Amino acid sequence: MQIIQLNVGGFDNNYSYLLVGENNEAILIDPTGAKEVIEQAIKDNNLKLVMQLLTHDHFDHTELVDYFKDKGIPLKSFEDLKKENTFEIAKIKVRTLFTPGHTKDGVCFKIENNLFTGDTLFVAGIGTIDYGGNEKELQESLAFLSTLDKEIILWPGHNYGGAKSTLGQALENSHIKPSEEMLEQIKKKVKEYEKPFQ
């Protein structure tokens, strides 16, 4: 499997991911931000998208879902994942880890020695609970992740502290939380970012 990490901009240094399996079939994780960046990567690598996956349902991770659905690319929803948390597509074996906290529907995807964590855990810090989250659940999810192999490669939903790290390194930084000033900036940014889509 090949991992293509795409810096798509979006709300704030967002990443989307293309996971390339057999016959150049690919899974798209968190379709968001600049669709031109995603489409160029698909074209450059001669890929055929076969599925969309979401780490959670915040708008800054889902804004291009309908765009790709209209192109015939199905979404495996949270409800689908609850029914079938382990599956294989394009010879890529995906295991869904349910990690609520940042949101109720937060998940991580474990694929081989890789963990796609969305906003549950960044290279430096964790996602805020201010938009439908729960602190107790987040801490329980982090405790669960700490039982996994610390050498797993972590691929986050935003570039907060770096593009990737080992799970162990990220967990060491999981005490880092956004400052009050940063939370205020996020609040303003959320309003501005969602305006064109309302």
Image: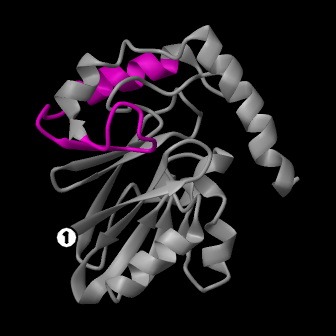
On the rendered image, what quadrant is the N terminus found in? bottom left
Residue ID for mark 1: 1
Number of labels in the image equals 1
174 with respect to 151 (left or right): right
Residue 135, percent from left and from top: 54, 15
Q: Look at the picture and state if 102 lies above or below 94.
A: above
Residue 104, percent from left and from top: 59, 34
**Res. 6 visible in picture:** yes
174 with respect to 55 (left or right): left
Q: Is residue 155 magenta?
A: yes
Q: Is residue 124 magenta?
A: no
Residue at x 62%, y 45% (from the top left corner) = 11
Q: Look at the picture and state if 71 lies above or below 6.
A: below
78 with respect to 47 (left or right): right
Q: Look at the picture and state if 44 lies above or below 101.
A: below
Q: Look at the picture and state if 82 lies above or below 98.
A: below
Residue 16, percent from left and from top: 45, 58
Q: Looking at the picture, which amino acid does disc 1 mark?
A: Met
**Res. 147 visible in picture:** no
Residue 155, percent from left and from top: 31, 46
Residue at x 60%, y 22% (from the top left corner) = 129
Residue at x 63%, y 77% (from the top left corner) = 69
* Residue farthest along the right direction in this orientation: 198
Magenta extent: 137-164
User: Between residues 22 and 124, which one lies in front from this camera angle?
Assistant: 124
Residue at x 63%, y 66% (from the top left corner) = 65
